[in-house]
Amino acid sequence: MASSLRVRASLISLIIFGGFLAAWHFAVQASTTGVEAMDPAYAALMGRSATTGASAIPGPGAVAWEIWNHVRDPFYDKGPNDKGLGIQLGYSLARVLIGYAIAVVVAVPLGFLIGMSELVYRALDPFIQVLKPISPLAWMPLALYTLKDSSISSIFVIFICSVWPILLNTSFGVAAVRREWLNVAKTLEVSRLRLMLFVILPAAAPTIMTGMRIAVSIAWLVIVAAEMLVGGTGIGYFVWNEWNNLSITSILVAILSIGLIGMALDQALAWLSKIFAYTE
Amino acid sequence: MSAFDDPFDKDKPLATGCPCGRHASQAAHDADETASTATGDDLLARCVETAVVNQVFGGDLGRRRFLGAFGAGTAAAAISQFFPLDAAKALAAETKGQLEKTKLKVGFVPITCATPIIMAHPMGFYSKFGLDVEVIKTAGWAVSRDKSLSGEYDAAHMLTPMPLAISVGAGSTQVPWTMPAVENINGQAITLHMKHKDKRDPKMWKGFKLAVPFDYSMHNFLLRYYLAEHGIDPDTDVQIRVLPPPEMVANLRAENVDGYLAPDPFNQRAVYDGIGFIHILSKEIWDGHPCCAFAASRQFVVENPNTFLALFKSIISATQYASDKNNRTEIAKAISPRNYLNQPETVVQQVLTGNYADGLGKVQQVPDRIDFNAFPWHSMAVWILTQMKRWGYVKEDIDYAKVAEDVYLATDAQKVMKDMGLTPPAETYEKYTVMGKEFDPREPDAYVKSFAISRVAG
Amino acid sequence: MDQKPVIRVEGLTKAFPQAGDPDPAPVFEDIWFTVQRGEFVCLIGHSGCGKTTFLNILAGLERESAGAVIVNSEEIVGPSLSRAVIFQGHALMPWMSVAGNIAFAVKSRWPTWGKAGVREQVQKFVDLVHLTGEEDKKPSQLSGGMKQRVGIARALSIEPEILLMDEPFSALDALTRGSLQEEVLNICARSGQTTLMITHDIDEAILLADKIVLMTNGPKAKICEIVENTLPSERSRQNFHRHPNYYPMRNHLIEFLVNRSKNFAAELADESYDPRHPPIVRPQADNPAGKPLSGADTSLTLDLKKAG
């Protein structure tokens, strides 16, 4: 019975996808405009859009072909400005993981402190509320100006944007630990360290993991934007480079790969969350 | 005006395999040490002196004041009491030819103005002078400036006003910058959206939104000059916006801007995609205007004199190769791929050869639509400074000649070109005619005050 | 002759601060009683009389407003491993297994013990509550009764001097309750564990307790009387209801819960009541037939013995 449900759902997904591809194909055909007659010497100097009226947006076939090109040879390296899609994604992923790791290392202990102490919570809250909504693109110029190195600035920007969900969820999770578990620990005269490690941390872990899952999606989002601003090697730079050439096809391929990696990161965190989940 | 007007013998190999450019091979160069020492000596000595004097006087301002008060001879005598200049020069002469750094990072923005910087990589101009250069594509002018200031780039492609702006502290921290060479002259255009093809008279452009790549750019100053000459005030009658060149075509298509004065290939690209047409080439505003530059910090020049010299020579050789119209097709092919300009080859070709479609149905032939001439005339710097003053980018009084000569290394260029067997111009100042009006570099203040539309009281 | 009591409650009063009321009425006041070593004492009363608060104070989880609790001649200052608590909700840590929960307590008590020692202690108490074989299960995989057994095992595994229980079986169904009561009876009888248990189940009190303390309704709840269990110490769930003293005990407690707990103020006016020495009562039937008590039936003899 369950597998029948899965089969039926997959079938529907496929139909929706097929419908989408068909709609895309016809939309591209439909946006072909008419063109006036052109001097052949003139026409030779003009691009496809101007001579045939074809839409600048590529059809599904063109995109599929481009995807295949990239997948076939993802790790080529022709110098600093032209590397394979695999390498670009790898650089971006590396920056994300470093910035994210720093965010976890800073946010979890700080979140603990805030969750356990009303004083610390009230003292830090105004700063958190002001800094939290600042967009990564606003941090970028400041980071570049002070840190100077563009890679370090990207990592900093990832850190400053992914730290908030982890921080807030940790502090919330810690503050919301069930009173009765804390009472049990009190009656057992449990030391502060054992209390944090064996009672509070496992109790708050699901909430912390939720924060981490949100943060990893934000981090991946931010790196693409940051790299478009700064350049270097990375998927954001790849998008910008293809944008220079108004190569919508390549941009679509990039978008697809960004989405897939984002999904993979989220799934990884979801799997990790399961390990720390418990049923009450 | 061009330094390359003299006949250039195509059969003589361009790169002779030695840093000074006068010998057939490195071996011959080494054998002829005395000859190369003599020709490169002046430049070397000047580098050493500059380095020492800067240390003693803590910068050009102090030095100029001292020189103004006491004269060069006294200055040299005073310094050599405390620092043996001759010994230093001798020491430098021993290490002459040794490059301090061979691995360099040079930034460029992917526009055709940077052709000499870019083509020097695939066509071997850097390696011929013993350098291993990575040319790094940069997202925009602000990033190029930031990465140059931070030292991530050893040298970079910049707009000609930028080294001046950085040296006087306009728009960034004040750091002494140098511009040893101009990359290109001409090569820009005003492109408008197809829907404006009946609005060829600029007087009809009131309320337009026009884009330029950067505030401190020839594009901005040329556009303002052009508009002002047609009676349009660029600050109140139109909106001038800064957009990175790669985004200009897309913004034009979306009709966020009505047109732009931008570097190529984005004018030709708009035509290629059927979005816009070329209204006027920049050479029709000022034939021979400078556009982009090759720039390095003064610190890099002083600390790495031999490397800088080699780099300077590679750029000048590349520029000079590009100035030959017969080479343009080959160059277009070399710089179009993804890791350089990343544009369709035909677009780049139309820009470089001047055989192009104008967007209005006609094929035009303008062979010097873009040209390459490295000489950094001091007078160009003065013109740029007058326009910066005119529009209020610089508010204090400037010593035009001093700034121009500090930043634009015209005298160095003269020496290097002579070294390489080329004939540089004898003077570093000349007059220009911009849209029919004459500019005399020796009368900058009068020029600034002579305009009907400006932010400075006439 | 009284031995030295393990627990002495002296003049215990608790008032919760109320917004806008500088002198709020206490939940309970002037509570005095003692618990001897090895005694099983039940505290009975309606909800709201502060029983749980009282237990929390004994456990060290809350502070009294006035008075003191003295354990082994020392006033208590906070929670202690020598006073183990079994909570009403089992309060097991859901991320730890059965063995893990118990081991957590054992390790807290004896931090220097090695793995083997801890495992042995854990197993001993798992077996004691008849959960052998379920050691690796997580609490969510256990029934309500099993979870509470783990709670019991956890509390006993640290071999506490005093066991405090807060209505431990009230959340369970009647059948499970019955079997757990039996287990507790056996365990405590065998080990001589000093226990104080809060309940509102009369039969539970009669089955388990040596002494039953009756608390009136709040606010200003007091101890009405202390009822000594007149059933023999060798009793069990199967037969205790057949003992002639069962119904006298039961009726007396019902009378208290239904009527007297509410109307104690009226009683106070009639007799001289000394909170330091609440009356000790021993309901029994001299009538071996065990006639059930009615309100006006005076054939029942109530031995009223005031302690000196």
Image: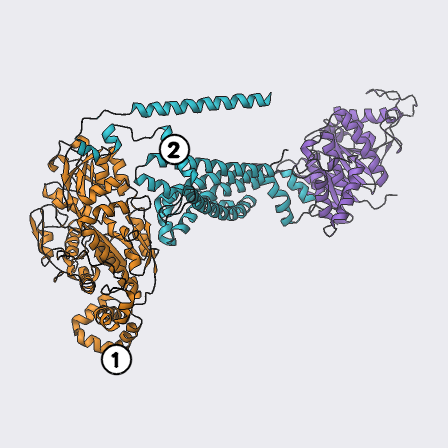
Q: Name the residue under label 2.
A: A65
Observer-nearest residue: B38 or B162? Answer: B38
Chain holding disc 2:
A
Q: Residues within 10 Å of mark 2 (few under 14, many from 20)?
A: few
- Relative to B188, is C166 on the left or the right? right
Residue B12 drawn above or below residue B51:
above
Identify by letter the chain in orange: B
The answer to the question of whether label 1 and label 2 lie on touching residues, with beta carbons closer than 8 A, is no
Q: Name the residue under label 1.
A: B81
When asked about the image quadrant of residue C33, the answer is top right
Colour of chain C in the image: purple
Colour of chain A in the image: cyan
Residue drawn 27% across and 62% down?
A: B17
Circle 1 or circle 2, nearest the eye: 2
- Relative to C95, is A60 on the left or the right? left
Secondary element at tag 2: helix
Residue drawn 78% across and 41% down?
A: C123
